[in-house]
Image: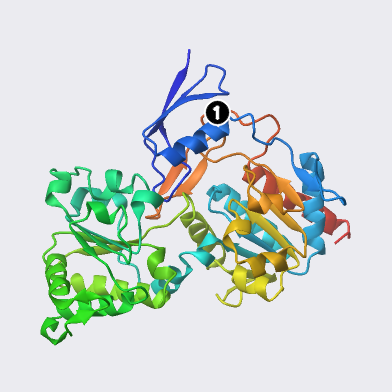
Amino acid sequence: MPKVIENVGCPYCGCACDDVRVTVSDDGKDILEVENVCAIGNEIFKHGCSEKRLNLPRLRQPDGTMKEISYEEAIEWTARHLIKAKKPLMYGFGSTNCEGQAAAARVMEISGGMLDNCATICHGPSFLAIFDNGYPTCTLGEVKNRADVIVYWGSNPAHAHPRHMSRYSIFPRGFFTGKGQKKRTVIVIDPRYTDTANVADYHLQVKQGHDYELFNAFRTVVNGYGDDLPDEVAGIKKETIIEVAEIMKNARFGTTFFGMGLTHTDGRNHNIDIAISLTRDLNKVSKWTIMAMRGHYNIAGPGVVWSWTFGFPYCLDLTKQNHAHMNPGETSSVDMAMRDEVDMFINIGTDAGAHFPYPAVKQLKKHPWVTIDPNINMASEISDLHIPVCICGVDVGGIVYRMDNVPIQFRKVIDPPEGVMDDETLLNKIADRMEELIAKGEA
């Protein structure tokens, strides 16, 4: 008989929804049905039992073709190249469980290389602002149960986090929000009229790149100087700014969710800095929190794991023994690639081939490139070695940190393809082999 597995975690976005129901075949190899999941999450689960999945690593041959090799050969190839490299870089970890991220830290500490995650090209500016100004945040459960005013600034969860609005923010009925959307005010601030803006009570179409000015205008009103505003700020009329600011001041519990519309526009970390300052100002008269809309389902994980391991969340320089260093701009992945400082690149749990600027990819491609990922993607297609691994939440479990930094225990629902390793096992085997080679004097 088919088996129904309850409370499964979804391996797609930072919501890390853990209420998924998966029906699997009696032999534990096929997924028959997936419930309580978005369309993208459904595709990830279905891909887990696809016949198209790779079950052996592929190594590029002199003629440019890819040849299947064993995992032992792939581990040996990677270990030897890591030892040989003077400044290797391992980047990614958006789709890797925390156990794998800890094992990756071990590998790069042995190799004396660089360790970075996807935050370096998305919410890295948020980290810098939080270092400077704190992080008055809460859990998504608190938002669901308490928030009566929701602000989405520079984010479009209708596309990027499909169940965020229905599970945590706008539509759910919480302990103190029993009437759901009827008693919530939704404010969307975005240069575009997005699908999220379509369900908002207020859409403030801010002028592109002028978010900082609008934050400053809100702070001006909240602090009692609204009359001093000009007739228009950042493309928004003075009357609208004052009206929305009064809604924020009168909120019982408000939450601002901000996305890469702030971190990727003019201002970057300064946008987040002033957003946090606005939250602090609002807390003088109301109750407000702020939260980053993290993208991948465990991209918050490396920031937590490496912070308690090394003291820094990203852009880690481990080239000096027993000493970790972080300096975004100097030790961040794209900057190092553009300067051609990296002589080996490991892409894990992401797709640097699609997300890095072309000049950076061109520089990285001059050196050995390994992709560790269950899927074929742009990075794997230009790699020298592609090592397929298990999919966290589908054929391997593990700890995942949701966007609000709450740890979730993901569960496996089917058996992985025969012989396929998970990230933790693979990386620990690479680390073990490196230590063996070093002990033999082959480093």
Residue in the foreground of this view, choosing between 208 and 70: 208
The image shows residue 306 at horizontal and vertical percentages of 54, 61
Question: Where 268 sits versus 198, above or below?
Answer: below
The image shows residue 343 at horizontal and vertical percentages of 76, 67
Describe the element under mark 1 as helix, strand or loop. Answer: loop
The image shows residue 31 at horizontal and vertical percentages of 51, 26
Question: Where 189 sits versus 327, above or below?
Answer: above
Q: How is the image coloured?
A: rainbow
Q: Is residue 431 visible?
A: yes
- In the picture of the structure, the residue carrying the numbered disc 1 is 414
Q: Residue at x 77, y 47 (%)?
A: 75
| Numbered label tally | 1
Q: Residue at x 37, y 75 (%)?
A: 209
Splitting the image into 4 quarters, where does residue 70 fall?
top right
Q: Residue at x 69, y 48 (%)?
A: 428
Judge from the rendering whether residue 102 lies leftward or rightward of residue 431; answer left or right: left
Judge from the rendering whether residue 152 lies leftward or rightward of residue 63; answer left or right: left
Judge from the rendering whether residue 147 lies leftward or rightward of residue 60; answer left or right: left
The image shows residue 191 at horizontal and vertical percentages of 32, 67
Q: Give the residue type that dot 1 points to.
A: Ile
